[in-house]
Amino acid sequence: MSDSTQNQLPFIEIGILTKGKPTLGMVLVSLLLQRFKAIRIEVVDTGDTAAIKRDDVMFALRLAFDLGIICNYRYLKEKERAFSLGRLKLLESMKGNHICFMDDDVVVSADTLAQVAPSLENGVYGFVAPRCKNAWFPAGFSQGRPHYSPGGVLYQDEIVRQILTEYYSTTVDVLDRQASPEKVWEIAFLTEMFHALGRPCAVQEDNLTYHLDYHERPNWGLDEEYLIQRSVRKARELAAKFGNAATT
């Protein structure tokens, strides 16, 4: 992809939340070595020890410098709501229209964002997501509609930013350690939020990312059906709250 072509495509801000998984360095390198270079990467680390002290992460950050790609790292000392507040910290840094939450165990191919980027040029959308191979999703949770997965690019305007800010500020995710009878699941929330806002969403079936955690399914210890229902209700509630406010 030529420099002139890249200059005509959207700029994508990528946020990686990590607890220091051994796969973090692989994720960073896979992003840095893509053909599509119009990116900035933000890393928020909530692990027990700072991942930046590891050689693989430090070498990846040096590679980012050599390639001229901004890659910022922050260490967040939060345990009870590490996932939700970590996402909120990423959101504070990602203020553009095209943002991407990337997991620390999902790697991309060299062409992943190059295939996504042309679909971002047609105005307001919900999300455009590659298909994440080996990722586990409850059967039928998205009711046959395109569902969000890590590596998907979201369209962020003021309405979406307000929704996400309130969501990450006030909810307890299934990945948070804090106990709560009202836990939610981010993927179900994001999928429903954009559908509730009436924004077109797409999954590119021939554009693959790869989930490196080869467990068959997560051990949430929660009733999946109720978890999804709560997440969907929250998405509809916030979409109505901020979507209606924008039209009054």
Image: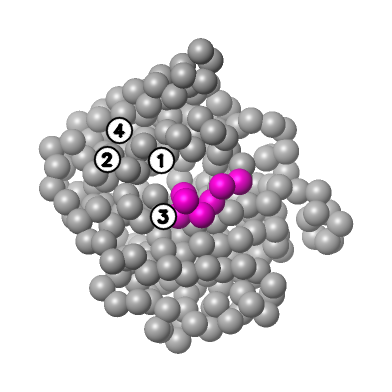
Q: Element at badge 1?
A: helix
Report how far apart the C-alphas of labels 1 and 2 lie in the structure.
10 Å
Report how far apart the C-alphas of labels 1 and 3 lie in the structure.
10 Å
Residue at mark 1: 165
Report how far apart the C-alphas of labels 3 and 4 lie in the structure.
21 Å
Q: Earlier in the sequence, mark 3 or mark 4?
A: 3
Please give the name of the residue rendered at 36% of the width and 56% of the height, measured from the top-left corner: 86
Please give the name of the residue rendered at 35% of the width and 71% of the height, measured from the top-left corner: 20
Q: Callout 4 environment at 10 Å: few (<14), some (14 to 19), or many (20+)?
A: many
Residue 157 place in picture, x, y as percent: 57, 35
Magenta stretch? 90-96
Residue type at tag 2: Thr
Residue type at tag 3: Lys
- Say which of 121 and 241 sits in front: 241
Of marks 1 and 4, the one in the foreground: 1
Residue at mark 3: 89
Report how far apart the C-alphas of labels 2 and 4 lie in the structure.
10 Å
Report how far apart the C-alphas of labels 1 and 4 lie in the structure.
15 Å
Residue at mark 4: 231
Q: Element at badge 2?
A: loop
- Residue at the extreme bottom of the image, as rendered: 55
Residue 72 place in picture, x, y as percent: 52, 68
Q: Element at badge 3?
A: helix
